[in-house]
Image (cartoon, rainbow, N blue to C red):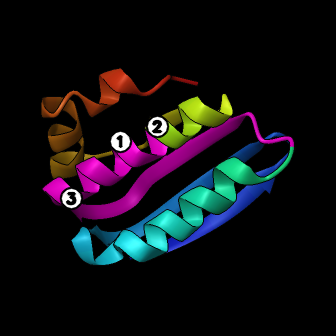
């Protein structure tokens, strides 16, 4: 999976592309840490528009992001999920756990 961080004022967008799976753990942790730790960041948007697959480990990684966001008082939202990925996020109640922008 590719992860791009795009900063705009107090917001950072994590744009994901490809398959979001367990093998992406280290890259994900690094991106999450960078995103929520940067001075002045109050909002993180995870853009799922180019994600074609997620596994159960990815669900756990989203929960890690949520916990780090809560610790740093940064709002986290999931946007642009589609198809099977959207269904998995919906069924796992992930969309309910993350704020809507």
Query: Residue 96: image x %, image y %?
Result: 32, 21
Tell me if residue 54 is in the magenta stretch: yes
The nearer-to-camera label among 3 and 2 is 2
Q: Secondary structure at mark 1?
A: helix
Q: Quadrant of the C terminus?
A: top right
Q: Secondary structure at mark 2?
A: helix
Circles 1 and 2, Cβ within 8 Å, touching? The answer is: yes
Tell me if residue 93 is in the magenta stretch: no
Mark 1 surroundings within 10 Å by alpha-carbon count, few (fewer than 14), some (14 through 19), many (20 or more)? some
Residue closest to the far front? 71
In the drawing, what numbered circle is on residue 57? Answer: 3
Identify the residue at horizontal 16%, vertical 59% (top origin): 55
Query: Residue 34: image x %, image y %?
Result: 67, 61
Instruction: Compute the Cα span from label 3 to label 2.
Output: 15 Å
Q: Is residue 64 above or below residue 98?
A: below
Instruction: Compute the Cα span from label 3 to label 1.
Output: 10 Å
Find the magenta span and give its range: 40-66
The quarter of the picture where residue 22 lies is bottom left
Residue that numbered label 1 is attached to: 63
């Amino acid at each position: 999976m590719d992860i791009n961080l795009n900063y705009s004022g107090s917001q950072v967008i994590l744009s994901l592309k490809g398959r979001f799976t367990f093998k992406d753990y280290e890259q994900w942790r690094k991106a999450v840490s960078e995103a929520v730790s940067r001075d002045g960041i109050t909002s993180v948007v995870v853009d799922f528009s180019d994600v074609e697959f997620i596994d159960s480990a990815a669900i756990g990684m989203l929960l890690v992001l949520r916990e780090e966001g809560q610790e740093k008082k940064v709002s986290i939202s999931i946007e642009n999920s589609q198809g099977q990925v959207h269904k998995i996020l919906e069924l796992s109640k992930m969309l309910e756990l993350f704020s809507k922008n």
